Image (cartoon, rainbow, N blue to C red):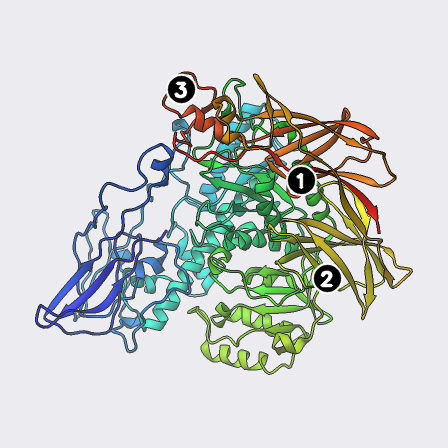
Amino acid sequence: MVGPQNRILKVSDDGLNFKDIANVSGSIVAQNTVGFPATTAKYWRMAFKTLALPVNRFAEMFGGKNVAAKPDGVKVAEFILFTTDRIDQFEDKAGFTPWKEDTKTYIPENADAVSKEGIVELTSKMQTDGSLNWTAPPGNWIIIRFGYSITGRQNHPASPEATGLEVDKLDKDAVRKCINTYLDMYKDATGGLMGAQGLQYMILDSYEAGHMTWTKTFPKEFKQRRGYDILNWLPVLTGRIIQSAESSEKFLWDFRKTIGELIAESHYDVIGEELHKRGMKRYTESHENKRIYLADGMDVKRYADIPMSAMWTPGSLAGGTNEEPRSEADIRESASVANIYGKPFVAAESMTSIGNAFSFHPEKLKRTADLEMASGLNRFVIHTSVHQSLDDKKPGFSLGPFGQYFTRQETWAEQSKAWMAYLARSCYLLQQGKNIAGILYFYGENNNITSVCETKLPAIPEGFEFDFVNASALLNAIQAKDGKLVAQSGNTYNVLMLDSTGRFMTLPVLKKIKTLAEAGVKIVGAKPERSPSLADDAAEFKKVVDEVWKHTNVTSFEAIKLQPDVIVKNAKSKILFRHRKSNIDIYWLNNRSENSTTAEVSFNITGKVPELWNPQTGNTEQVSYQIKDSRTIVPLKFESWDAFFIVFKEKAIANAYVKPATTETSVAQISTPWKVSFKNKQVVFDSLTSWADNADDNIKYYSGTAEYENAFNLKAKSKTGYIIDLGNVKNIAEVIVNGKDMGIAWKSPFKLDITEAVKAGSNKIQVKLTNLWVNRLIGDAQPDVKTKTTFTTMPFYQADSKLLPSGLLGPVKILSVAKK
């Protein structure tokens, strides 16, 4: 979390004209220390800017006002001016908040510092009554007493009987005891049905437990990991500068790094170990949003059986009309863990929303689901499908304002098979073989991906895919072979690319890069400047850097001249891709636009025939192609938010193939009145209009399925195919022609193949059209409603909320399909 940026320290010599000296950080820690250059002034003032009233989205959901009645104000106990240097923002750097390593900070030159020799440890002089028995040598001494306590943080949300203090996540024994106590309760409740024959998985959700900075074994762990004793450096945790400002900052980096390692090993890894003892496995999420605690997400997930992440629907958290880059990065982090460590599944808390309840449907969700797959996901965990225990309470329970509301009580639940089949087919193919990515992207140390990629993903050259790698994976799970990077999984990469955060690099990581460079691995990125750790020798660091950067294979990406895996030309929108390889090559392509587009797509494959595999229908078809210059070029058409697979399977016997073109010709337009049957009402629509525009409240506020009936004539049935084009549909349509179910249309273009059902002469058509719950919820919120037909656990909609377009809006056409 970040506090308000509204505090400024000002000075003046006349009491009238003030100038700014320092901005006080927006830290959420109760005490904030800010460093600034030595300044002399007569008047000192702390200025607080009144901020805009905070928005309360939850109050708005309950029908209240979305802003507070008045500003919160600023609580200030005191502010102190020091005459000696203090470490800028030391409270944050000491782990009380999730410090971001790229945060701007003031580090003075020639700072007032205490020598290491001037630090005396007095623990043995402390008496049992709390008094200190020490004869101080001559001089001025400051005595600092250190202690630690529980944070007081409780787990949440939880029922009262399940609420208690958070476990010390830096203590392996405490975590082991905690998780086994928890699992033993499940064992009792299930009669021992845990493991293969019972409860198989546990999900460790995104971390929301607050910050921990100490455990009883911390000094021992610190010395073992960092190679030096922590005790003489402890005063730095109070803002004092020991030895030098640079040394103190490096100690704080080591302190944060140790906390992060302990969380990963003592909390996540221990839980995984205990689950495995019971035959169980774990899904594991990490930060999800920015940097919410001090640990590296790839370390958190590296031993997870199924690395997991999260993606929210557009506008849910950050506003705007697009999904957040940090969600893409979060999923890519999980995918990178899977690809490096050899895990078959990549999961995500998927399509999560806040607000806009019950307004979601497959067409609306597809863009988000597809972006998850583009980021590396191949297993959806829908957040949330709340258990609906009552049949008379619809749409039913929700997890507060959060979730996807996807349950058996959804209006379109009975028609969801087509949507579920699309996701299942897509994930099945994306689980095959191994992921292919040419670039391994190192994002620095003591970082996390959703912080580094909070607003944008790395600038990777067009046509290449990449996996993230962190320090521990680079050190322990990546080797060099034949000039390539080889992961523990067997996946290979052509290039190691260094993020700009790599300019601060520890010596062990630098030495590993030296080993890779000497083995001929191609390395791209800026030369590291220094180590951020106090444990590393600066002279040795410089020597190794110079040795690495003299290699000719440590160069620019352009100089490497690699062939892109996929080249997209002439597309009007962004086309994303994923590449899997088993005994066949599987490319997944996705149009990131509501508009259709054509494109010429060139694949780094030769000698094989491409086929289009459509996950919406399950059908495969031939495509035109040309094999040229060791690449295969395929002209493709992408519909609105389209996604499909191009699969290279069979050996090519020709270097080119042109698929016969087809034309679609309208042979009938159904413009006669439609008979429409609602649940308790039958009406005739002279034209296709939205139910929300109807004067009859029973139709205007209707939510559910209505059946449209009509007919059309064909003079004669030709040997060509036939398609029904429903035009605009809100929101899902199941089509029956002459008594034969022709399938479910759930996205634009709303077209279905009806060749098998049509006949010469009159043809009967039925369209089972389903809208969403929103309009009925608004209808039930009207002031004159005496009996409500819906139930929700939160009042998501008010009487004046906007109704959604609903129904079959058309125009409905019958198209004949013929080869040119």
Residue drawn at (18%, 52%) of the image: 76
Q: Is residue 525 left or right of residue 5?
A: right
The answer, for residue 141, to whether it is visible in the render is: no
- Residue 127: give x, y in percent of width and height: 23, 51
Query: Marks 3/2: CA distance?
Result: 57 Å
At label 1, the amino acid type is Phe
Considering depth in this image, is 131 or 538 the residue closer to the camera? Answer: 538
Q: Is residue 711 left or right of residue 702?
A: right
Label 2, on which residue? 600
Q: Select label 2 or label 1 by which is in front.
A: 1
At label 3, the amino acid type is Val
Label 1, on which residue? 750
Q: Which mark is residue 785?
A: 3
Q: Earlier in the sequence, mark 3 or mark 1?
A: 1
The answer, for residue 200, to whether it is visible in the render is: yes
Query: Marks 3/1: CA distance?
Result: 36 Å
Q: Is residue 19 left or right of residue 525?
A: left
Report if the CB atoms under discs 2 and 1 are less than 8 Å apart. Answer: no
- Residue 255: give x, y in percent of width and height: 40, 60
